């Protein structure tokens, strides 16, 4: 069973390929992804690595957690499941009406 690891405090120059290289000596890597800002394309300084099994993931945490990469001590630990987000949308999840968030009553027309 695959095990996903969170990798934090990454130098901004680290890309997916470099992240994979950092973990390659710990076992088989299924995926390695640095999270980037969707507008600028710049790294957000963290990513995820998915190892092929729990034993390799444990080895990776032991070997790489607090390892210094380009002057930064990276953090590696087991990734937590992503929490469900509530999509509030453009208007904050409230109605598209008045300032109080309620919907206007248009039953009387526009006047």
Image: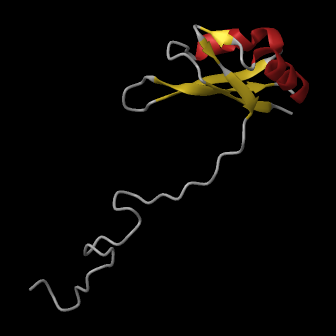
Q: Position of residue 107 (x, y in %)?
A: 23, 90
At horizontal 80% and vertical 32% (from top left) the residue drawn is 3
On the rendered structure, is 108 left or right of 24? Answer: left
Q: Quadrant of the C terminus?
A: bottom left
Residue 67, by quadrant, is top right
Q: Position of residue 52 (x, y in %)?
A: 83, 25
On the rendered structure, is 63 left or right of 82? Answer: right
Q: Quadrant of the N terminus?
A: top right
Q: Position of residue 50 (x, y in %)?
A: 74, 27
On the rendered structure, is 101 left or right of 21? Answer: left
The outermost residue toward the right is: 55
At horizontal 68% and vertical 9% (from top left) the residue drawn is 21
Residue 104, by quadrant, is bottom left
Q: Looking at the image, what colour scheme do you see? A: secondary structure
The outermost residue toward the left is: 111
Q: Up-down: is 34 above or below 17?
A: below
Residue 35, by quadrant, is top right
Closest to the observer: 85 or 66?
Answer: 66
Q: Position of residue 62 (x, y in %)?
A: 83, 20
Q: How many marks?
A: 0
At horizontal 91% and vertical 25% (from top left) the residue drawn is 55
Q: Up-down: is 77 above or below 62?
A: below
Q: Up-down: is 14 above or below 106?
A: above
On the rendered structure, is 79 left or right of 60? Answer: left
């Amino acid at each position: 069973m695959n095990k996903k690891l969170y990798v934090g405090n990454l130098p901004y120059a680290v890309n997916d390929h470099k992240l994979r290289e950092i973990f390659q000596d710990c076992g088989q890597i299924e995926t390695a992804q640095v999270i980037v800002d969707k507008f600028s394309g710049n790294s957000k300084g963290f990513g995820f690595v998915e190892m092929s099994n729990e034993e390799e993931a444990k080895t990776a945490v032991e070997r790489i957690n607090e390892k210094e990469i380009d002057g930064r001590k990276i953090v590696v630990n087991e990734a937590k499941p992503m929490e469900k987000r509530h999509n509030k949308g453009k208007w904050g999840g409230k109605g598209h009406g008045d300032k109080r968030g309620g919907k206007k009553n248009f039953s009387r027309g526009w006047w």
